[in-house]
Image (tube, helix red, strand yellow):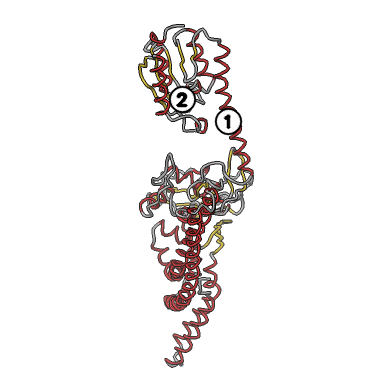
Amino acid sequence: MENKNKITYFLYARKSSESEDRQVQSIDDQISRLKELANNLGISIVEILTEAKTAKKPYCRPVFTEMLERIDKGEAQGILCWQINRLSRNPVDSGTLGWMLQQGALKSIQTIDREYLPDDNVLLFNIETGQANQFIIDLKKNSMRGMIGKADRGWLPSRAPLGYLNDKLEHTIIEDAERFHLVRKMWDMMLTGNYTPPQIREIANTEWGFITPKTKRSGGTQIGNSSIYRMFTNLFYTGMFEWHSNAYKGNHTPMISLEEYDRVQTILGRDGKPRAQTHEFAYTGLMICEVCGSMYTATEKTKIIKTTGKTKTYIYYHCTRRKKSVVCDQKSPMTLKKLEDQIDIELERHTILPKFQQWALEILNRSNDKEIEERTKVYETQNKLLIETQKELDALTKMRYRELIDDETFIKERDEIKMKIVKFKTSIKETESRADKWLELTEKTFNFACYARKEFITGDLNKKREIFSALGQNFSIKDQKVHINQNEWLVPIEKAYPALETEYKRLELDKTLTDTMRKECFAQLILTWGAYWDLNPD
């Protein structure tokens, strides 16, 4: 055996952050103990090399690779490490080390409890390095088995996406109270068709101050561009999830419906990528063909007017015919003018006079006073429950101080109570803003009915798209006719308003009525108008 004093060593310390190394000492501890060993054995250390990389796969550790190259050049002849598995957990690196030992380029591998030499039994070295490799194989199998079982039980065996959190105590996935409603708001913006993912990301980051949850390795930053696309193509938000090419029904709280998910995928385009467009069109991504179910798109064409020799640009909307399994007979494209004429007719059916808007808002404000009264009662009840729950937490903490319960029971019950407190605080916040939100949304309804048609005629592409989207949902086209599943809040206008408007104009023009009689008639008209609207937030 060659004298250790004639051999120089590289001290190599490695620790992976993965589960394979949970029981291994830290790099600093390894270095400290190995220095002590080197001093006891009279080993000369050329350099201390450290690395925080996994050894499961070959060619993934640049420091390790460089160390072997330097040994080949003669800069050192030995390696000092904690255990042989610090050097290798895969057959490729194990084979390289074994070959270097046999060839004499590597004269010694010294671990904390034994030494490997060139003239040792090769079989013994292979068995010990093979055990390290087998450990990784078994670990992978056991981990995979556990993850499959978790998926079968309805829980995603991975990090929860934005808007959700991993409950490490219960091993489930829960709503992120701080971000859940904001992520839902992003989906709502996407569903309007008026925003692109980068625009939504910019609004979330700059206007909302959105910050991703902080984890040990990442997070605590603004949402990135790739993250926003990944979010809008993630099936998890529907209450289902995909894992290893299989779909599972999840136990977590859904954020959106499958129909909403499908619509966003359509807006984004195939594979969740935004459609490449050389022109901007107002209504693409909103309408489907009733015959084949494919989306309607737009094309811009330029024609030469023979009489004048000048060019004129036309925009046509037509079926994409992407669904090859269905034969589509919708061959004639629809001009932009024909489409917008139909939208204008639909808006006219839902347009009210400013006087009716004024009456509706007056009724609305009276109803809002009643809502404030009811909201106060709800708020008081919720606040009382919050105070009682906080007292529960205080009592539980005192029990732990007095050692009446153990740590495990304390942590479990504490986390449950804290979750209740978060929910109560969220409910209180929602209660505080409920009436204001209702008032705001209802005002928007009447403002839309009063002014939308005028704004549609004079507005830009984004305004036209926004107004068209507000008319309803599930827009479809057949034989150049647009069909709209109108929003519920427009139904009273369509059904009740025309007769009321006719009566209003009649009363205005009736010269036989005195001012008092006209006021009484208008008062009855207002009551009828209010009766058609369930002007309360319940």
- Report how many numbered discs are placed on residues in the image: 2
Task: Residue 105: tell me if it is visible.
Answer: yes
Query: Which residue in the structure is indicated by mark 2?
Result: 60
Front residue of 89/505: it is 89
Q: Earlier in the sequence, mark 2 or mark 1?
A: 2
Spatial CA distance of label 2 from label 1 is 19 Å
Task: Return the x and y of residue 449 as percentages of the image width and height.
Answer: 46, 70
Q: Residues within 10 Å of mark 2 (few under 14, many from 20)?
A: few
Q: Quadrant of residue 171?
A: top right
Task: Return the x and y of residue 201 as percentages of the image width and height.
Answer: 41, 49
* Residue shown at 43% from the left, 39% from the top: 217
Image vertical order of residue 347 relative to residue 117, above or below = below
The amino acid on which the numbered mark 2 sits, given as a three-letter code, is Cys
The tag on residue 179 is none
The amino acid on which the numbered mark 1 sits, given as a three-letter code, is Leu
**Which type of secondary structure does the marked residue at label 1 adopt?**
helix
Task: Return the x and y of residue 295 as percentages of the image width and height.
Answer: 54, 50
The tag on residue 139 is 1
Front residue of 174/257: it is 174
Task: Residue 338: tell me if it is visible.
Answer: no
Task: Return the x and y of residue 16 as percentages of the image width and height.
Answer: 47, 30
> In the image, 247: left or right of 234?
right
**Which type of secondary structure does the marked residue at label 2 adopt?**
loop
Front residue of 449/511: it is 449
Is label 2 or label 1 in front?
Answer: 1
Front residue of 113/194: it is 113
Image vertical order of residue 304 relative to residue 19, above or below = below
Q: Residues within 10 Å of mark 1 (few under 14, many from 20)?
A: some
